[in-house]
Structures are given as C-alpha cells and as structure tokens.
Amino acid sequence: MMKLSRQFTVFGSAIFCVVVFSLYLMLDHLQLDHTKSPNGGDRLQNGQLSILQDKIDRLERLLAENNEIIANIRDSVINLKESVKDGRGGPDSGNMSQGPYPDLLVSPPLVLPIDSQDCQFAARQFSKPADGVQLLDVYDLLTFDNPDGGVWKQGFDITYQENEWDSEPLQVYLVPHSHNDPGWLKTFDDYYRDQTQHILNNMVVKLNEDSRRKMIWSEISYFELSVHATFLIFGHVYTRVKPQTGWAVDPFGHSPTQAYLLKQAGLANMLIQRVHYSIKKHFASQKTLEFFWRQNWDPASSTDMLCHMMPFYSYDVPHTCGPDPKVCCQFDFKRLPGGRVSCPWRIPPQPITDVNVQQRVQMLLDQYRKKSKLFRTKVLMVPLGDDFRYTEALEWDQQFQNYQKLFDYMNSHPELHVKAQFGTISDYFGALRKSAMDPGHASLSLPVVSGDFFTYADRDDHYWSGYFTSRPFYKRLDRILESHLRGAEILFSLALANIQRAGKPNGFPSVESYRLLTEARRNLGLFQHHDAIAGTGKELVVIDYGTRLFHSILNLKQVMVNSAHWLILKDKNAYSHNPSKAFLQMDDVQPAQDALPRKTVLKISLQPRSVVIYNPTEQDRMSVVTVYVNTPHVRVDTSHSHPIPAQVSAVWDDATTASTEAFQLSFVVQVPALGLGVYHLSKAEEGGAETAQYLFLRQGGELSLSVKHFTVNNPQDDTTPVSIHNPHLQVWSSATTGLMEVKLKEDGSEHRIKVEFAWYGTTSSRDKSGAYLFLPDGEAKMYSPAQSPVIRVTKGSVFSEITTTFDHVTHTLRLYNVQGVDGQAVEICNSVDIRGEFNREIAMRLTSDLDSKDRFFTDLNGFQIQPRRTMAKLPLQANFYPMTSMAYLQDSGTRMTLLSAQSLGSASLKSGQLEVIMDRRLNQDDNRGLGQGVLDNKVTSNSFRLLLEKRAKTDNEGEKPSPLSYPSMLSHVSSLYLNHPLIPMAVSTEAGSLSLTRFSPLASSLPCDIHMVNLRTIQSKEGGGPSDEAALILHRKGFDCALSNRNTGLLCATTQGKIRTEKLFSNLRLGSIAAVSLTLMHQTEGGSSQEEISLKPMEISTFRVQLT
C-alpha cells in the first residue's frame, strides 16, 4: 500500500506539472505573438492591445478553472486510494460526480495497481497428473498416417477371449437417439413441421407402450415449438427435468470450454464424437476413450468433467455397435427390406424371429464385445440413431421390438455373460461411475485429459478447417447480436431496478422489452448450432438465420433506447413512452439482413442536439466515438457546456470522392462503467471541431479527386513512406509495397510488420474445398492487384488512418490519438468483396520479425488460450485453427497479438507469421451432405486490433513448451472494447428540451480482471414478463503480468478476485444474493457470501440477485 501511495503521489504531481507546463507554453506563445509583430513591441497596431488583453483575461479564467481541475483530481485520487484499500478497485462515482467537472472521469494511473498475488496464477508451471494425457504431447507423438485397419478402416483389428466376461458380465446400454439439426438443409421451422414434431409426438406414444423403452433428446430449441413438451427453453429451467449429460455428436471438433460450461451449469457428464481419426485410434489403443476432461489451467480437479469419446467414424448405426459397419448396419432395423433406406454393404437386416435370434445375437454380441475392448470397464454404451430418426411409428416398432427380442435372449442366457437393455445416456454414465470408481476396482480409475480436439479430420487429409471462416458476414453479425444482447440485458435490468426503486414506472414498456430480449436470446442461441455459426447450411437456411439475427438486433436497439430514455432523464416524472415517436434513436441502421449497417446522418443546428453514449463495459472508459453529421462546422460540449476535442473527417462515397452531405464527427468521451454519458452537438462556424487533412497517393496512375471542405495534398510520383502516429505508436506504410512498420514509443523499439493479402485456391483432385473442408492447391499466392491501389492518408487530432483501396479489399490502418487502451493498438479494418471469384479464399497475412519459431496461440471461445504448434508432418490445412477473438505470437522479448471482432480461421505457417482467412468462395460441394458450394458471399467487414507488447521475461527454449498461456491485461480490455463498442444514441429532433443527466450505476469500475458477462433479468414465474430478480454472471480472467501494464488508461485495480457487495452499485443495493449454477438450476457452494463475492482465477460464477 505504501508503494501504491507513492504511485498516487507521483501521479498527482505529474498532472500538476503537465498543467503548469501547458500554461507556460501558452504564455510563451503569447510572447512569441508579440515579438513577431513586424514593427516591434512599441508599434502594435490598433486593436492588438485589446486582443492581448482579451487573451490575458482568458488565460486568467483558464488558470482558475485549472485550479479547480487540480483540486478535483486531488479529491479523486484520495477516493481512488480509499477504494483500493477497501477492495473496490476504482474511484467512487458518487464522489466523482461532485466538483466543477462531473463529466470528467479521474485521470488514470501510469501503471495499473496489480496485486502481486494476482500475478502468481499465470506464473505457475503446468503440472500433469500421473495418469494424465496432454493433447499437445499426443500431437507430438502421433505420425498421423492412415494405414488400412481392416473392417475398422481407421483403426485396428480387435480380438478377445471368450471367458473375459465370466467373472463380470458385460453391461450394454443401447441408447436410442435422433439427431435433429435446428436448421441445415431445411430451416428450423421447416424441420419442425416436416420431421421433428412427428418424432416428439411418436415419442410420447411409443415410450408409454413399454416401460423398458428409453430415448434421449438433446436439441432443446425444438421444445419451445412442441405441443407435448412442458419445458422452458432458457437456463435449463425445465419444469420436470434437470439435465445431467451433454450430448455432442455432430459439432466439428471440441473445445474444453464446452466441458467447463457444462460443469458450471451443473451437468456431470458429456459425450463427444467428431474427433480426428488418428486421435480416436490412439485413445482407443490406450483405452482412454472415457476420461475426465480437465482444464489446462486447473491445478487440481475442480473442473473435471467425465467424458465419453465415441471411437468410430460416425454416430449412425453402422458405426456405433462395433468396429465392423457391414455387420452393424444389419442391426439398423429401419433398413429392413422394403424401406427407403438400405445398407451400402448390400447385406440387409433381418427381422428377429425365434428361428434366427440365436445366430443374430452371436453376431451382435461379437461386435459389442470387440467394442468393449476399447474401454477400461465392462460397461458399454451403444447409440441407436441417426439424423431425424424415429419420425414414423413404424420405425419405433422396428427398432424397439426387434432389439427387445435380442435383449430377451441375451438376458435369459447367463452363459453369454451379458446384460443388455435400453437406457439413457445418464443410465450409462451412472453405471460407468459405479464400475470405474468402485473401491474394489481402484486399478480401473479413468485417466485425466487436458487440451482441445482441433482441428478435426474425418478421413485422409480432409481437415474441417474451412468452416472456421465460411460465411464470415454472419459470423460478424452473430458477434454484433451477442454484444447488443448483453448491452440491452444489462441496461434493461438497471432501468427496471431503478424504476422499481423509484416507484415510477410511468408506462415503461417492461413486458414488451422483456419479450424482445427473450426472442433475441432464442435467436442467438439458435445460431450457435453447429450448422449455423459454422456457415454450413443451405443458402435459404442461412437467409432464415440472418433474418432472425437482423430482427433481433433491431429489437435490442429498441430495448436499449427505451431503457436509456428513462435513465438519463433528470426529472423522472417527465418520462413518457411513445412507440411512434422515440425519444432516442440509434446512430446506425442496417437496411437488410445481408447488408452492412449504415450510419444515420444527424441534423445539427445552432440549437444544441444531445447525444447519449452508452458504455456497455464494466470499466470507466475513455474512447473515441464517431457519428455522422450534416455539416463540417460543428462543436461538441459536455453536458455542462465545456468544449471537448473533436475532429471532422470526410465520409467517402468511393476511394476519392467525399460526400458533401455527410461528415464524420469523432470525439473523445469519458463514460462511467455500464453508464450513460451526455454530450451536446451544435453548429459552430468557428472554434468547432478541427478538420482532418488528406494525402492521396497512387503509383503510376492519375487520380480524380472530388473533395470539398478539407485540405488535400496529392504529390506526384512520391515514393516516400507515409507515416501516422499517436502517443504510443508510429506506423509507416509504403504505397508500393504495402509494408507496415510499427514503432513502440514507450521504449523506441521498432518492429517490421508487413501486411499482405494472399489467395488460396482449391486442389485439382476429386475432393475439393467446400463449406466444411479446406483443401488448398498448395501454399498461398500473394495478392497482386491488376492496378495500383489508391492510398488515402487521413491526419487529425482525434485519429489518423491510412486506407488502401484494392480491387477486392479496402484496407484501413487507424491510430487513435488518445491515451489509454484505444491508443495502444493499430486498428485494422478490411472490407472484403470476392463475389466475382472462382474457387478462391482470401487471407490477410502479418509477417513480423518475431522469432516465434513453430509456436503460436489462439483463444478458445473467447474464454481461454490454447498454445498451438505448426507441424510439418501435417498438411497445410491441418495447421489452421479457430480464432474466436484473438491469436498471438511471441518471442523472448515481444508479443504480437491480433484481436478479432469475428471468428475466423488462423495459422502461423512460418516463424513470425500470422494469417487469417477472411472469406471463401467455393463452387462445389465437399461431400459432407450440404449439397452445394459457398457462393452467397456478401461485402464483409472484418475488424481487428493489433497489439505489440514488451515481455518482461524470456522463454527457456530448452524446456518443453507449456500448455498454459494467458493474454495481458491490456489485451483483455482491448478485446472487450473491440467487441463491445460504445453505443451512441441521439435525442430526436422532435423531442422537447428535457434536462438530461449522466447515469453512473456502479460505485466504481469492477476489478480489472473481472468481466461482467451479464446482468440478466429473470423471467417471472407468473406470466412471461420480468421478475424482480436478475442473474449476475461474472468471469475472473487469467492474465500474464510479464507484459507491460503501463498507459492502459484504466481506472481499476486487482483485488484477488474479491468484490464487496454493498459497494458494487452506486444507488442500488443487493437485497439478496445466492450463488447458483450457470443456468440457475442448482444452488452452489463457493467462497462468496452475502457481503463479498470471491472468484478464483478463470472462474465463471453466477449469482441470483435482487436489486433494490
């Protein structure tokens, strides 16, 4: 704490020095003006003395105001010290609102106050359990060859002795299932109408005919449509069932985050299927197909999830009863002769009769026994199903009646040493746990596995790395909806709680808003389906998904507008809800589900127009906001009429034509955590926002420029690299080579980072790239445009950027001229259009001077980091991995991180190189069932941030690479800001002149490493409206202290994961708080109490709270 006090003292002194030095410069400037007079000091022209007097008067006013600012800063620093002492981690916004400038947040400390104990988590070494399997080691071990394994083509021959089950019989659980994609070849609604509703209706009838029959169901999204189901879709809040087991037979690869989330939701078991065939073969040979899946970062066993990996090629009947699909197909009784489906091996099933039952039992039991040899216990799970099975009553009878005859025979002949029955997946896991963990079977304990199962290949070199990028437009739309939903949920919950506390609903549309939130949750949840977010559905299905996302984004904007309207009014009695005349309007409009959003042009006049800025992050935030206005002559003031720096830039109709009707207005705002700030825009002929300056370059080509209101420079044949810079970074770019060079101003180090674009083609062999598969025709070929690109350089006081316009990509590098998080990254925006291409994929490649060798890192689900290794023994497409939100390279002294606002495929094919596939256009199907190529490309906007960070420690290259890695604190917050931008809302020109006030709901920023995943109002038990309770979901992030924490601009500290509940909100309080599972179904035990929330590193915790 003494060290922290010294930091605050230095910090306050530095601010004072800066202010004094600024005033000195102003005085010096006045003196220079005086000496530059052509006739000397004694010959001032008439009027100049009065001008000088005015300047001196203005300077005196500035001195007085600066004294007030310093006093305000001093008080705020004291508050910050006190808040760190009591664990709040930031300034008390209640005190912040006092003083002469309530719109200004406290200036941030130079170095984040990180508790030393909070650094120990990321610094510790990975410890593998004695019976542990680390998947990075498995990848190193395997040769990834594919020899013919006999009847089990991708495996090996399995043998057994007849007497192996004499002492303990084989327990067989046959698990009937039907895989119902919520959209793929048909839309969600069409599947339900044509198939799913019949399956569910038959289930109710047929299961009641015989109590021995069982059936499992996993696609919960369909239950909201079923007339027979009595389940609620959200939070697993079913009226009758609490799920115990996750069932994932069709997702294309598997992440340990999936296991963690299921564990946090209260589930005990899970099953996975689509895993690389070489991994399956290895796990089968080691009998590790049943294992406890543990998170890499878990030093103990608290995250262990019991997992079953299916051993064979598919989840259909031919590939689930045993190793020989030719035999297993004969026990899929839907394929009996005369039906619509037959066996490809041309040996059909036979109805089971008294005559053939003995022989058919011997055939089937042989497969069961062989399959059981791949596991450590005598408990065997055998799925019985496929896509959209059991639609007709006939199939129910065929499967259940024939299998019951087989089971009756098995169970009545003890010499077979088998007990077979229908069962649910939970029945199987219950028996497995009993068998594997029985004290008498200690040697049968199951192994612990850590790592992930990407990238998936189902045969040969057919790696499913194409879907990491397919339909990137909708991957981006998904992320926008996710951000809007979270922002709307939190703002609605805060508005509702404040309304209930004030007792003044005044017609607030709480029920309608909650209905829109519920619908948006459903649509976002639906799109997480593996054929939706993956981009692997039919075009008509993609349009259906896109329309759902699009409508929900529009609806969520309305929820945010309605909530913000109530919260920002100073006089709550003045609130009136009028759906036809919204008080606030969003500043952008998306015209259609397949179009990029467009900014609304705000009409500005001499009468100030208010703009409300919503900060959906849990950190007090200083960021740049850009809106479009109808005039270049505009000024921006705080709600207390203090002018703030602003920049007017052009809106471009094309690369060289500036609009004369719309202008970008960019200004730096300071908005409290989860709060609302108010700013005023007005017309100003002078003294308003500074106008940007432009430089145009094009090698060997003439430029036709149409630009008014801005200074433009168009040098001829200039090959000098252009440069932009901000307080943290300097970037150079060449008009001819596209070379980008980045300089860190903190220590003056320079790194050569070349940004290039490249094309991948598809192989000339029979199997080609498609929606799922990436099968390139070799290494990428560098993008070579037919004509020289147009280079446009923007230089301004708020941001500067370099925009390069190619035929297929408009590439922008932007630097924000602000201190803090936004100023530390290079923002990269690519507008991609490959609609005219044939079998091509376009990649952005960053080539740096980092000595990263064959290692790089990608995130899993935006939750954790997975180290990767580029392997020469694997084909190129196998070295691509999913990048949900970030990827990075590092060497002993530097880390280069690419943060992404959309999920894409990424790779590091050479040392120092990082690339992402931005879009794919493929003219054929890849034979995985879709039946079409990917030809519905859109103009797609991809957004990234590039971070360069110094590392304080060096890697020991002689040691084995660790499976543990964490982003820096700066990287975490930069990603948060990228994915959850500030949301501007303009007050309608038709609204009256109501007095508005800033809304600051939190007592302070949350601790730096704690993210508020959501604050979601819970549905009322009576009716479909909101209750007075909410789900507070928090995530404590793991971060690496070996990277710099300077100049982050953050107003937070770390507090060892602790938050005092009474100091969480500024005006509201937590009337009750209870720790629950992720989906609110189970009460949980933890380190938290009514007085204090306590989170372990990486932990996601959920609390049922009542805000009063």
Image (cartoon, rainbow, N blue to C red):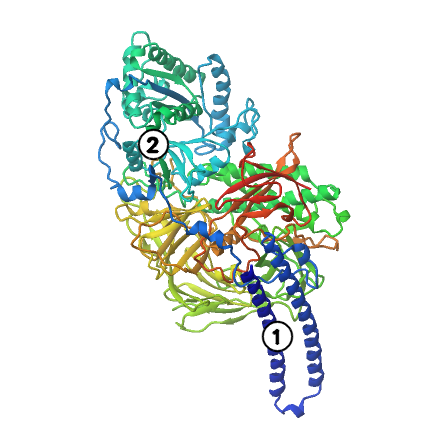
Closer to the camera in the image, 1017 or 347 = 1017
Quadrant position of the N terminus in the picture: bottom right
Q: Position of residue 987 (x, y in %)?
A: 68, 53
List the residue tagged with mark 2: 289
Q: Is 294 drawn above or below residue 957 in the view shown?
A: above
Sequence-first tag of 1 and 2: 1
Q: Are marks 1 and 2 in contact (CB under 8 Å)?
A: no
Classify mark 1: residues with Cα within 10 Å, few (<14), some (14-19) or many (20+): some
Quarter-of-image position of residue 554: top right
Helix, strand or loop for disc 1 = helix
* Amino acid identity at mark 2: Leu
Closer to the camera in the image, 152 or 590 = 152
Q: Where is residue 538 in the image (x, y as percent from the top left)?
A: 43, 37
Q: Where is residue 953 in the image (x, y as percent from the top left)?
A: 39, 59
Quarter-of-image position of residue 767: top left
Q: Is 873 drawn above or below residue 277 in the view shown?
A: below
Q: Is 167 drawn above or below residue 8 in the view shown?
A: above
List the residue tagged with mark 1: 20
* Amino acid identity at mark 1: Val
Residue at x 23% of width, y 20% of height: 161
Q: Where is residue 247 in the image (x, y as percent from the top left)?
A: 43, 30
Label of residue 75 in the image: none
Residue that sits furthest to the right in the current view: 573
Helix, strand or loop for disc 2 = loop
Q: Could you give the CA–CA distance between mark 1 and mark 2, rounded to whole angstroms?
A: 69 Å
